Amino acid sequence: MVPRLSLLLFSALLLGFAFPQGTKYTIQRGEVSFKSDAPLELIEAKSKMLKGVIDMEERAFAFSVDMSSFEGFNSPLQKEHFNENYMESRVYKTATFTGKIIEKDDFTKDGSYTIRTKGKLTVHGISKERIIKSEVTTKNGKIQVRSIFTVLLDEHGIAIPKIVYQKIAEEISVEVDADFVEMGG
């Protein structure tokens, strides 16, 4: 039920129904990458299918990525195991992060800002409240957001079988890099 709520909020923000007033920004280019640095194996993958929107007046945001869109694994079999055995991408199609921006800075003005966001990170169908720090750079009406944070697999119900526990890290490093432009602008 929670993933549907996050998807509904994301859709409402994107379509402008949730907050009809105010300036909204949408992702022009966005990617999410992750790294699992375990004792016996380094696994890295990236998706260029990040979607997102920021409502400046409400200081609200919503991000979503299709879990099956990640590329760059060490082998096709590794990608298959990621989607079928760990992320169960057919059941839990997306990962989302929705919430509010804590700082009151007007980062629509040119400059560099460090902001914190508070919201629900939903991965593998399990939502956890998180505060995530991001670096924001604004220049000529474009906003670049970059964030690096970690995700603990057990917090999202992702089990690592004993046979591969030295090949998959329990803590995954995630990096988000997105360029936003004003909607309708």
Image: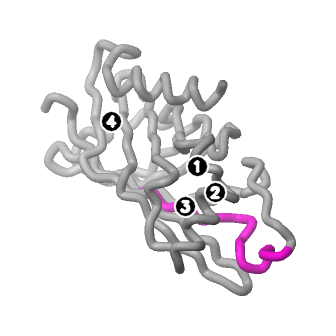
**For the residue marked with disc 2, what is the amino acid?**
Glu
Contact between labelled residues 3 and 4, with CB atoms less than 8 Å apart: no
Q: Which residues are magenta?
A: 163-177
Q: Secondary structure at mark 1?
A: loop
Q: Callout 2: 10 Å neighbours few (<14), some, many (20+)?
A: some
Residue at mark 1 to residue at mark 2: CA–CA distance: 6 Å
Q: Secondary structure at mark 2?
A: helix
Measured as percent of width and height from the top left, residue 5 is found at 57, 23
Q: Callout 3: 10 Å neighbours few (<14), some, many (20+)?
A: some
**For the residue marked with disc 3, what is the amino acid?**
Val
What is the residue that sits farthest to the right in this orientation? Answer: 162
Name which of mark 3 and mark 2 comes first in the sequence: 2
Measured as percent of width and height from the top left, residue 133 is found at 53, 51
Q: Which residue is mark 3?
A: 174
Q: Secondary structure at mark 3?
A: strand
Name which of mark 4 and mark 3 comes first in the sequence: 4
